[in-house]
Amino acid sequence: MHENNTDNNNDVIICRCEEISKEEIINAIRNGADTVTLVKKYTRAGMGLCKGKTCSIVIQRLIAEYSGKRPDQIPFDIEREPFRPVKISVMGNYEDENALVDHEICLKRK
Amino acid sequence: MIEKKADVVIVGGGIIGCSTAYGLAKMGKKVIVIERDYVASQGSGRNAGGVRVQGRLPAELPIVMEAVEIWKTLDKELGINSEYRQTGNVFLASSDKEKELHEKMAKRLQEQGLKDVRVLSEQEVRKVIPALKQGMCKGGSYCSIDGMANPLNTTFGYANAAAALGVEIIEHKKVDSIDLANTRVDGVTAGDLKVKCDTLMIAIGSWSNDLMEPIGIKMPITPCRNQIFVTEVLPPIVEPFLLTPIVYCNQTYNGNMFVGNVDPDDYCLGNSANPNETKRTARNIIRYIPALAEANIIRAWGGPLDLSADDMPILGDVPGTEGLVMACGFSGHGFASAPYIGKLLSEHISLGKPSYSLHAFRYKRFQETNAKVDENVYAYGQAIGKNR
């Protein structure tokens, strides 16, 4: 196990949205999470409102330290749309008629 | 070339593969699971986590009812937090005709032994879901033992429990072919890995025919891409799993809301969300639950269901190929019943006699009869994939 030389406090929160500590992330990595995506799925780190903007880079570095790779060899998580959080009312208020399948149309089809 | 040997090889590290591996390991079998990507990378990690009993087809009902009994003690058994809880499940009826279908369905389910299902008036539905907008339904069907769980936690839980019992789970390894010795399964080849086995189980959902067609067998399944979006953590808004005729939503243990359309009709493979479909889902859900209008969507994703020709899974032996066991065509019903299906498949493989007959799910039914979706047993005349 590579020790993180700059910060030995494992209680520090890495994912602020979901309040996931460094210790929880290191445990996930020890249990086999070898990508940013898997750390997310094991711990919820990066599942919050900011979509991993601040924690992804730290998680990438922690995986790299543990596996002895360079950080750029650890892929980031898949970017899922929308690229920033959007309110449901905003997402649903669209003008593209081709995308429109209204409640009424839908019920008529049944 | 690396060579290995096992009693059973399972292709596919989803919840069906992992729960079957766990069952087999408990019976002392040496099992190797081979997964193309990572455990729960497809349907088992992408679904909304509904554990629903109502609305099931007659042959499936006893299986999912027994699965509920296993769900109740699963956390203890696997040493996990599956977040399973019985929140109830509501099917809304948008017309009097649909309400009649609900009444018919509820009667059939009650006759089959499901006492926990009843038909509600609109007023009663709004008592269960106060956030539901007035005038959006003519009532609905409610089942109190239905619920939901966290698909990732559950599937990882099965994989870890299986591994602790000695199951070898090989990830990031794509099986290229099924190896036959005359009409008998000999094993599989996956790149530089060759595994010999007595029994081979294929549990790779929509991708089944990639392995089956080269040995001359075609599973009657159609992939249908579904998608979900998830909101930020919200205070409790909708307690039960809510299914309307056009959209569904359920709130996770953490408070995030899953929202998806019920009629995608998108017959392809694919893991990303169609932006138009996300817009349509957003518009649809706030018609029913206006309180969600201000909730932020964090992300949307997709994944294919493996719809079988009659919406029932294909389980068990494949005639003509000894040692080959199929588990596919779950048609979106897999997650809820997986704890019991895994047990049944492991009994089928190791004892030759599962505790509940898999006869109704045999592959041969498609040759014997013109098995197709029975619209009479559904409340909505089969919402998903009706035009396949």
Image (cartoon, rainbow, N blue to C red):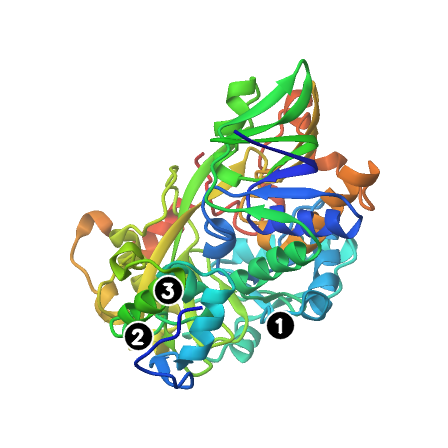
Residue A89: x and y in percent read 25, 71
Q: In the picture, which quadrant includes the N terminus of chain A?
A: bottom left
Which amino acid, mark 1? Answer: Arg
Residues behind callouts 3 and 1 on a single chain = no
Label 2 close to label 1 by CB (< 8 Å): no
Residue B270 placement: quadrant: top left
Residue found 58% across the figure and 48% down from its top: B169
State which quadrant residue B258 falls in: bottom left
- Is residue B287 visible in the rendered structure shown here? no
Cα distance between the residues tagged 2 and 1: 25 Å
Tell me the residue that label 3 is attached to. A63
Mark 3 Cα-neighbour bin, 10 Å: few <14, some 14–19, many ≥20: many
Q: Is residue B328 visible?
A: yes
Image position of B22 with respect to B131: above or below: above
Q: How many marks?
A: 3
- Left or right: A4 with respect to B71? left
Mark 3 in CB contact with mark 1 (< 8 angstroms) = no
Under mark 2, the amino acid is: Leu
Residue on which the image places disc 2:
A49
Q: CA distance from mark 3 to mark 1?
A: 34 Å
Residue B282 percent location from the top left of the image: 31, 63
